[in-house]
Amino acid sequence: MKVLHVNAGLSGGAAIAARRLHDSLAGQGVESRFLYPFGAAPDPTYVPYATGLAAALRAGWQHFQIRSMAPWLWGRRVDYEIFSDSRHALPLSARAPGFAPDVLHLHWTAGFLAYRSFFSGVPAPFPVVWTLHDMHAFTGGCHYSFGCERFTRACGSCPQLGFLRAESDPSRQNFLLKRDALRGRNLHVVADSRWLEGEARRSAVLAEARSFRTIHYGVDVAAFSPKPRTECRRALGLAQDAFIVCFGAQTHANRRKGMPEMLAALGRLRSRPRLLALAFGDAMPKLPAELPPVRSLGALSSADALATAYGAADVFVIPSLAEAFGQTALEAMACARPVVGFDTGGIPDMVIPGRTGLLARAGDPAALAESIGWMDEHPGEREEMGHRARAMVEAQFTLDRQAQSYGALYRSIAGG
């Protein structure tokens, strides 16, 4: 079985998930290649679409493509997720030199996939798997709709555009481009959470997909494994008797990640003398003076550094207002740490209230603070939740289990 993966880069949450799958498929007897725009290849199984001057020109065009959307974004709310335009992507063929796949597997392709030229080079009966890491594959450009239902019809007059939005705006054009390119395709849609599968099933873009299913992300349970809390705290210079709340995101400025709600919840807990917040990710915003102590570790790129941060904590908090899945929560659970989060998106797929963590009303800082406070006041139950979280990851969220699920899917559709 040979599979060609296509993703719009090597970094970011979706790329991490796609690469973990690609790297683990060999154990299932699947020969895999990973096609991406440009940049140094980690190993020979990774295939950059462009190199040298072609890569520089492609990068320049992508920059121009982003800039061309600027007029449509005037007056747009600054706290929205990115809006990705698919109308002017450069031609891309679904080919890797010397490699003839049995299945084409798409991942996060925002701004990278030129729908007409790409799918015109793929025979309609050829099996295509598309793993959704957010909503962009089936909307007119947004990555999270925040309650907008237009993707179920035809988009247009997009509330995430600015002053110029209209029925025929780029969201409608992108929507029609995607819908027409996917008509009649042997397309099999995979979501990383039950919530995202439900949204995909309602989309008019994916109306002719042959199948829908949820296959959860897997995590390396050896790289993300329990570490002694005392050693992790000693390594990071943290107090041994503190109640440590860990949280993190690639970018804290992303409104969807819930930083204002997290800080508001911490503010409600400032009277707890032992509480220490441990953050990782990009630069933290300016913090209000009334917060408890906050220690920032900056960006953490290695599994060992992340596992040390999780291991130092008593509880991990994922305050996202919208989240397709939430890999940081899964990594923390693999490190035997319970998770507190909002009851939204894919978070409830792994955070089971009273068993692996606690869920708070979505967007409610007071409820989030109450759940964190409960964890502080119930150390025995908290530790039990951590142990159950690790057991749940070992049973349901390993890379082998994820690869087995995809291997079975590949065989079922390639055989047809």
Image (cartoon, helix red, strand yellow):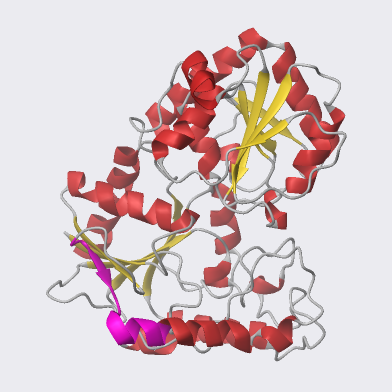
Expressed as whole percent of the image width and height from the top left, the position of residue 289 reads 86, 37
Q: Nearer the viewer, residue 263 or 340?
A: 263
- The picture quadrant where one finds residue 326 is top right
**121 or 245, which is in the foreground?**
245
Q: Is residue 401 above or below residue 321?
A: above
* Quadrant (top left/top right/bottom left/bottom right) for the C terminus: bottom left
For residue 123, say whether it is visible.
Answer: no
In the image: residue 334, left or right of residue 237: left
- Residue 146 placement (x, y as % from top left): 73, 61
Q: Is residue 41 left or right of residue 394?
A: left
Classify residue 351 by image quadrant.
Answer: top right
Q: Is residue 380 above or below residue 335?
A: above
Q: Determine the residue positioned at 27% across, 62% down.
A: 413
Outermost residue to the front: 237
Query: Is 204 contained in the magenta span?
Result: no
Relative horizontal placement of residue 23, taking residue 360 as reference (left or right): left
Specify the farthest residue to the left. 98
> Does the magenta run of residues contain 47?
yes
Residue at 81% x, 35% y is 265
Give the side of residue 330 with respect to residue 287, left or right: left
Point out the image quarter for the N terminus. Answer: bottom left
Range covered by the magenta-colored residues: 44-58
Where does the image place residue 122, in percent across and percent down from the top left?
29, 82
Relative to 260, say whether 98 is above or below. below
